[in-house]
Image: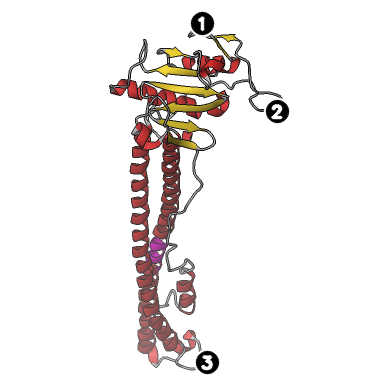
Amino acid sequence: MTVRPRRWLMLALAPIVALSFLAAPASPAMAEPGDGASATPDESGGSVGKNATLDDVIESSNRRFVAAKAAVAKSTTAQKKLANDIRLAEGRRLALLPEVNAIAGQQYRTGHLGTAGFLLGSQGSSDFLRKAVSLEEINTLQDRKLAELNKVIDEVNSKKAALDAEVRKQQTNLVAMRKQKDAANKALALVGGESLTQGVVLAKSPVAAPAPRDSNGGFASLPCNVDDPTTGGCITARTLHMYKEVKKAGFDRFVGCHRDGGPFEHPKGRACDWSLQDRGFAVAHNADMKTYGNNLMAFLVRNADRLGIYYVIWYKQIWFPTRGWSTYHGPSAHTDHVHVSML
């Protein structure tokens, strides 16, 4: 009876085979949240509704920011575990190498003779059979161990690649959330911040049609020669354009523009006072009036460059495009109307 070893040639290649499955790095690519440029205010809305307030947007952005940050931390922790799994797999591979070397030593212990010579040098058929079976068993064991090791290494590397992709995705998500959060905070600062609106102001305002500009792209001084639709006086064409755009945006409560006397813009036809109620003026004494004033102020501020607005006054605060908000110390607290002056 003749027994032939089937895989004895693989023994010499075994170390190379084992090494070929360890091309992937053994240490994780740890992810750190990155910084990004601020998003535009329009991007801060996320998935909130059409009538969302800035307070809603900031809360939503904060929640999503925390969730994204937690996901990155979870992925990073999982990566550390996989890095340890890879180190263990490397240890198993190193532990396996002496066995491979032992087999090689047994194969070539007869000097320059190969495995075939080793088998042919057997003392009789029983010795040959014993040696052949021994080599076959060792080969089978070695094949099984190599297959098991390679499977583990493949699985670990596959998981590591998947988690690397997950960390990159979550890092991108975290940067996006940070942009949205920053954009929402900037949008809130533009309309006076928490101190003026408490966040109860629309996250987005309608976009006004731009007022005509001069040949240099600026807003030249205009005469008060257009009939004021709110009084018997006059206003400028630019003030009338602003008036129409505010009405078009849905702010249709009482308003008065031209007013005789005084050193400021009303007698020049370049200012309007927008009341918080349908007739006359009254200090904001409920949430509806304050919210109406907040949203009207936000529309004017957000469209200031398009409309040619000089400044806005609302609830003891004054806003100039060049310097933002500051405390207003004029004769009226402007808690009963929103004042807008035009260039």
Q: For residue 10, say whether it is visible.
A: no
Q: Is residue 56 magenta?
A: no
Q: Position of residue 235 (x, y in %)?
A: 56, 13
Query: Closer to the camera: disc 3 or disc 1?
Result: 1
Q: Which residue is mark 2?
A: 216
Query: Closer to the camera: disc 2 or disc 3?
Result: 2
Using the image as rendered, state which of residue 111 and residue 67 is in the foreground: 67
Q: Position of residue 25 (x, y in %)?
A: 46, 67
Q: Look at 39% across and 78% down and name the residue there.
A: 94
> Viewed as shown, does residue 240 lie left or right of 144?
right
Q: Quadrant of the N terminus?
A: bottom left
Q: Are marks 2 and 3 in contact (CB under 8 Å)?
A: no
Q: Position of residue 334 (x, y in %)?
A: 39, 24
SS at mark 3?
loop
Using the image as rendered, state which of residue 30 and residue 291 is in the foreground: 291
Q: Is residue 156 magenta?
A: yes
